[in-house]
Amino acid sequence: MHVAWLGKKSPFCGNVTYSREVTTALQELGHTVSFFHFAQDDPVPDHWPEDPGAADAVQEISIPYFLKAQIYTIPTLQSRKILSQALEELRPDVVHASLTLSPLDFALPEICGDLNIPLVATFHPAFDREQRNLSSTTQYLSYQLYAPCLAKYDRVIVFSKLQRRLLIRLGVAPSRVVVIPNGVDIEKYSPGDSKFKAEMGAERIFLYQGRIAPEKNVESLLKAWKHARMEPNAKLVIVGNHGALANSLMPFYGPEHGIEWLGFIADEQRRIEILRGSDVFVLPSLVEGLSLSLLEAMACGVACVATDVGADGEVLENEAGVVLLRNQPVATQLKTLLPLLRDHTQWTTTLGQNARRRVEERYTLSSNISKVESLYEELLTQRKQNQRMGHYFSTLRDRFSSSILRSGQ
């Protein structure tokens, strides 16, 4: 099967990881992948280490842009024409768009409709089911904006039942919205030995790994850590890009409080080593979809704490982790919880074991890919049936026209 994938390779975010993991898995299963992404004649942007053994198997098509930011992209006026011509030349079996929040997302249904190519979307925007703050309200608006467009896609993949209900309420047909949770490679992300704790010189390691952005609510974690006085035998490690927000926080939350800022780490094996050497992973987000960072930590057997937003609370329910309540301040809850997690090692060990088991049961990459493959096959079968029906009715029409002509003679 030939899949034309439209996704992101930079700047680093969950969409980048999702695109990398899914397309790599599809290749390993023998499918051909053509990867469309926004780039200025740069086929391999930063933060996506390529597998040399697989590099030749991927045909990359660069789409020019005016502006590419963490959340959205503004393409050039020629981008649509370049995309259309490339798809017409390649004639893939299916187009799968890991939506990049760009105007091209809205043009794809018409482009693929003209070419008679099935179109699938993965819709990533996070959300807070209670819409309780400015960030979550902004996210909800993205659902309202996209719903009429998503209604024209053949299928829309979301990560949770909550997201599915929201899109259906906004007018997308239930038959078009499919829940396929994020998946993690449980062979690669697994418990194992690590020297990271010795490197940090700490008895207990707490970890945040992800973007340093307002919706991730990292400051609440930092405040709680500082007020709980977790040092000297515990350290909080922050792995993520050192942008403007991180630079504004670092002077107030530093090594003197047991907080280490490691910046962005592109080396995946190093990130796995950090996870394996950590005792507790904390995700204090205000909004989420389904965090891949959370699933990776769970797969490595780390005790996990996350807010009950998006699907993260659903992932950790029934003792697979600790879920922070939505109706109480995150910093207040963490201030009480962090010392308990520091002191009760058997509790965190059990939580880590439960987390690993939950991922094995529900969130493996292999399961995710199997469902994606089945979705492609369903769409291809449907297209063949439609083509046969179209040919059948066309034949009937021609015969009817000929019969009328003969009777007129």
Image (spheres, grey):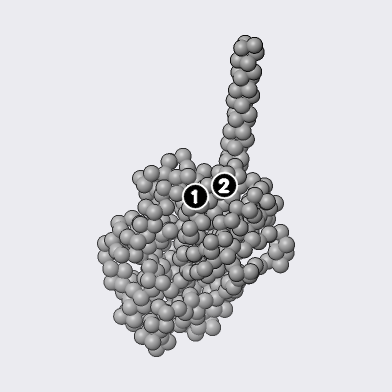
Q: Residue furthest front?
A: 409
Which residue is pictured at 60% across the width and 15% down the height?
404
Q: Nearer the viewer, residue 200 or 371?
A: 371
User: Which image quarter holds the C terminus?
Assistant: top right
Which residue is pictured at 49% across the width and 64% down the height?
74
Amino acid of disc 1: Ile
Q: Residues within 10 Å of mark 2 (few under 14, many from 20)?
A: some
Amino acid of disc 2: Cys
Quick one: SS at disc 1?
Answer: strand
| Residue 321 drawn above or below residue 260 | above
Residue 113: % across, % down: 55, 44
Residue 407: % across, % down: 62, 11
Q: Residues within 10 Å of mark 1 (few under 14, many from 20)?
A: many
Disc 1 to disc 2, how far (Cα)? 17 Å
349 horizontally vs 113: left or right: left
| Residue on which disc 2 sits | 112
Residue 330: % across, % down: 31, 69
311 horizontally vs 48: left or right: left
In the rendering, which numbered label is found on residue 70? none
Which residue is pictured at 60% across the width and 53% down the height?
84
The quadrant in which residue 135 appears is: bottom left
Disc nearer the start of the sequence (1/2): 2
| Residue 313 drawn above or below residue 233 | above
Q: Residue furthest bottom?
A: 256
149 horizontally vs 134: left or right: right
The quadrant in which residue 168 appears is: top left
Residue 56: % across, % down: 73, 62
Q: Is mark 1 in CB contact (under 8 Å) with mark 2?
A: no
In the rendering, which numbered label is found on residue 157? 1
Q: Is residue 161 visible?
A: no
Quick one: SS at disc 2?
Answer: helix
